Image: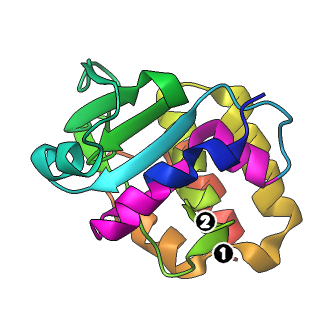
Amino acid sequence: MIDHQEILPIIRRFEENELTYSLGGSGLLYYLKLTDLVNDWDFMVECPKDILLTAIDGYDWLEQDSGDYPFASKYRIHITSLRIDIIGGFAFYAEGEVVHLPTSHIRNRTWDGIKISSPEIWYVAYYLMGREEKSNLILGHLQTYKEIVDKQLIRNLLKKNGLNYEIREELSKLIQ
């Protein structure tokens, strides 16, 4: 198990450099108490790659493939020592379109000062990745705790081209 305290120095770097970021992936699942295990930390950022690289200067990083189907993100940087993946311009190929998913949202959730991504965004992301178990975990959480559902975010997601009937149907049910 990875301790989230270890990533706080990176969070400080993101904040000092005024980067728009949020934690998703298994870190989000852990925050939502949907898993007991975090394999790595997935951060989405909205900034040019050179600005991110300035912010993480001094860390051991390497660039990984990005944009390989179904992923359409601009770049992916891995910080080996902290098991962090930083994804710039979070996006997926779906239904012949590029579906850009937002990094920030109206309801900014935080966990010990770490900005947390929206479960609605990661329901869509996991669905588009073909990770059915994880997308269903998040969908079940949203269905159980309807009071946390960000209806405006879902309305914005439903405006995106590239989402198939099934995902549109499930998102629509969350705002009824």
Q: Looking at the picture, which amino acid does disc 1 mark?
A: Ile
Q: Residue at x 69, y 73 (%)?
A: 149
Residue 145 position within the rendered picture, expressed as x and y whole percent measured from the top left:
85, 68
- C-alpha distance separating marks 2 and 1: 6 Å
Q: Which residues are magenta?
A: 11-32
**Residue 175 marker:** 1
The residue furthest front is: 58
Kind of residue at badge 2:
Ser
- Residue 49 seen anywhere in this rendered image of the structure: yes
The tag on residue 172 is 2
Task: Mark 2 and mark 1 in contact? Answer it, CB < 8 Å.
Answer: yes
Q: Position of residue 101 (x, y in %)?
A: 37, 54
Q: For the N terminus, give its image quadrant.
A: top right
Secondary structure, mark 1, is loop
What kind of element bears circle 2?
Answer: helix
- Residue 83 seen anywhere in this rendered image of the structure: no
| Quarter of the figure with the C terminus | bottom right
Q: Nearer the viewer, residue 55 or 129?
A: 55
Q: Is residue 150 left or right of residue 37?
A: left
Task: Specify few, some or many for label 2: CA neighbours under 10 Å numbering under 14, 14-19, or 20 or more.
Answer: some
**In the image shown, does 68 or 108 lie closer to the viewer?**
108
Q: Quadrant of residue 175?
A: bottom right
* Residue 7 figure quarter: top right
Q: Is residue 85 left or right of residue 99?
A: right
Magenta residue check for 25: yes
Q: Residues within 10 Å of mark 1 (few under 14, many from 20)?
A: some
